[in-house]
Image: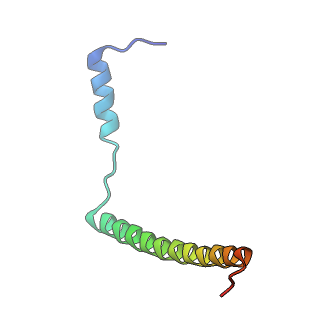
Amino acid sequence: MAKTSPSEFFNQVKAEASKIVWPTSRETMMTTVMVVIMTATLGIFFFGIDTFFGWVVRMLLSLAAGTAN
């Protein structure tokens, strides 16, 4: 493994940091909106699935107890 002097290390870090491409404010806003939409959609979806399976379990338990509604 090659040894690197501290000054050469910092020069390499500076060179790599200059290659970073930051997103524009429009790209950041669009990504934020998409994350909020997808989170809301998945929240509603899983709420519906949870409600449905809760209903199924309640029905099965009431059948097993002999008190079907």
Residue at 29%, 62% in the rendered image: 24
Q: Please give left or right for residue 65 compared with residue 27 in the image.
A: right
Find residue 32 and report its horizontal and vertical position in percent.
34, 66
Q: Is residue 66 above or below residue 24?
A: below
Find residue 2 and report its horizontal and vertical position in percent.
45, 12
Q: Is residue 22 above or below residue 12?
A: below
- Which corner quadrant of the image does residue 30 belong to? bottom left
| Quarter of the figure with the C terminus | bottom right
Q: Please give left or right for residue 2 compared with residue 50 in the image.
A: left
- Which corner quadrant of the image does residue 11 belong to? top left
Looking at this view, name the residue that lies furthest to the front. Answer: 66
Find residue 16 and report its horizontal and vertical position in percent.
35, 36
Q: Please give left or right for residue 25 compared with residue 68 in the image.
A: left
Q: Nearer the viewer, residue 69 or 9?
A: 69
Residue at 31%, 30% in the rendered image: 13
Q: Nearer the viewer, residue 37 or 17?
A: 37
Residue at 69%, 84% in the rendered image: 68
Looking at this view, name the residue that lies furthest to the bottom. Answer: 69
Q: Is residue 56 above or below residue 26?
A: below
Q: Please give left or right for residue 43 compared with residue 57 in the image.
A: left
Asked which colour scheme the image uses, the reply is rainbow
Residue at 54%, 78% in the rendered image: 48
Q: Tag count in the figure?
A: 0
Find residue 33 and report its horizontal and vertical position in percent.
35, 71
Q: Nearer the viewer, residue 41 or 20?
A: 41
